[in-house]
Image (spheres, grey):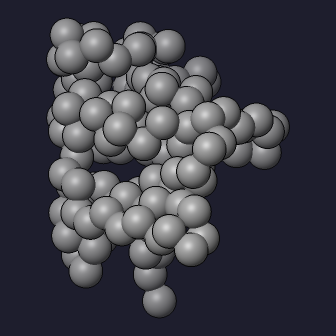
Amino acid sequence: MRILHTMLRVGDLDRSLAFYTEVLGMRLLRRNDYPEGKFTLAFVGYQEEAAGAVLELTYNWGVDKYELGTAYGHVAIAVDDARAACAAIRERGGKVVRDAGPMKGGTTVIAFVEDPDGYKVELIQRP
């Protein structure tokens, strides 16, 4: 068994695709419209789905906002240099909500960015 994907409901698919591809550097792997169900699915990631987990962005036609809830945490991405990643994300219009630095009570360097729908993405610097 392995994790295939994590699904996030988004209020504006084009805006979310721009964030995940242009700001975070993922690739659009596939996109399908489902007119009978009135939704679109777009899968993004750094590698093909057969090679690793990806994100499924679900746009339900006509729904432009969701309540995130208190149970959801974040998606985590490994980076070589968290400070450089934050700088690059800012340059591409992304929102850094916690600058790179040691995690509370530890030494691992982390940072957090936020996607257009308010979902948090953690950047974890590789040792």
Q: Is residue 20 visible?
A: no
Q: Position of residue 81 (x, y in %)?
A: 20, 26
Q: Residue at point 65% right, 42% down?
A: 63
Question: Which one is in front, 45 or 101?
Answer: 45
When the figure is inspected, residue 64 is found, relative to residue 4, above or below; the finding is: above
Q: Quadrant of the C terminus?
A: top left
Q: Position of residue 67 (x, y in %)?
A: 76, 35
* Res 55 → quadrant: bottom left
Furthest-bottom residue in this view = 1
Question: Which one is in front, 122 or 120?
Answer: 120
Q: Residue at point 54% right, 61% down?
A: 39
Furthest-front residue in this view = 36
6 left or right of 124 in image: right
* Res 95 → quadrant: top left
Question: Which one is in front, 41 or 120?
Answer: 41
Q: Residue at point 48% right, 26% down?
A: 116
Q: Is residue 93 visible?
A: yes
Q: Residue at point 43% right, 75% down?
A: 4
